[in-house]
Amino acid sequence: QPALTQPASVSGSPGQSINISCSGTSSDIGAYKYVSWYQQNPGKAPELLIYEVTKRPSGISYRFSGSKSVNTASLTISGLQPEDEADYYCSSYTKSRTFVFGTGTKVTAL
Amino acid sequence: QVQVVESGGGVVQPGRSLRLSCAASGFIFSSYGMHWVRQAPGKGLEWVAVISYDGSEKYYADSVRGRFTISRDDSKSTVYLQMNSLRVEDTAVYHCARDLYGFSSDYWGQGTLVSVSS
């Protein structure tokens, strides 16, 4: 199962909104509403930001939102803050009953 | 609070075996599926395996199927990853994570490092 495709890096000025795309196929993203997004800081465990495309776990800022169209999912970070600098990964359930992660995106606040 | 703590990593030669453990606490372990996810040094996340809450269903990534086995012991609130026929490319930090509604992972451990080298 090939990894989902994400841009290697995305940057924005503090206060701006940025979008991270996650491109898959009809066998993963396009097949289900089971896309998740994770934030990972250096040397730390990943943290769940979004599950089931749009849902936020308790304690996750409203500035993080998710969406999906056909075979592509997106994570939007509104009002970018310096502490948002991290690596971000998407993930999807697949028709093979397995999971696949994205290639990862490094977010920089300029 | 919910905690998952991995152990069992180390340096091992290619072709050898290793068993990782993940001890969970702070929740009803027998009600949750569990995942293993790995991350090679400087690389991205790679999903490895999942076991259902009752152990009846297990699924694996193509890269480890036939070599790795996931299992659980609810009496010890522990999930295991038995890794056989290890390869250099299996070198990674291995995280365990609690499953959320069958399609996501909400609590992750810090991971345990497995280094496969001759």
Image (spheres, coloured by chain):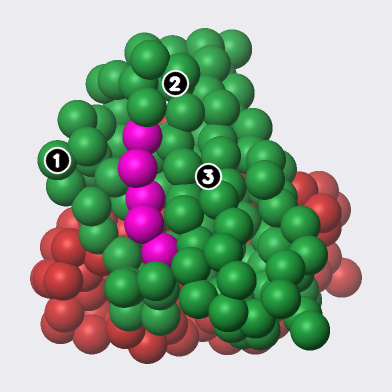
Label drawn at residue B23:
none
Magenta region includes residue B93: no
Where does label 3 land, which residue?
A: B96
Q: Of helix, strand and loop, which one carries label 1?
A: loop
Q: Number of callouts in the render?
A: 3
Where does label 1 land, which residue?
A: B56
Label 1 to label 2: alpha-carbon separation: 16 Å
In this rendering, would B105 be left or right of A86? left
Label 3 to label 2: alpha-carbon separation: 13 Å
Magenta region includes residue B69: yes
- The subunit letter for the residue under badge 2 reads B
Q: Are marks 1 and 2 in contact (CB under 8 Å)?
A: no
Among numbered discs 3 and 2, the one appearing first in the sequence: 2
Where does label 2 land, which residue?
A: B77
Where residue B40 sits: x, y (%)? 68, 73
Which span of residues is magenta-colored? Answer: B68-72
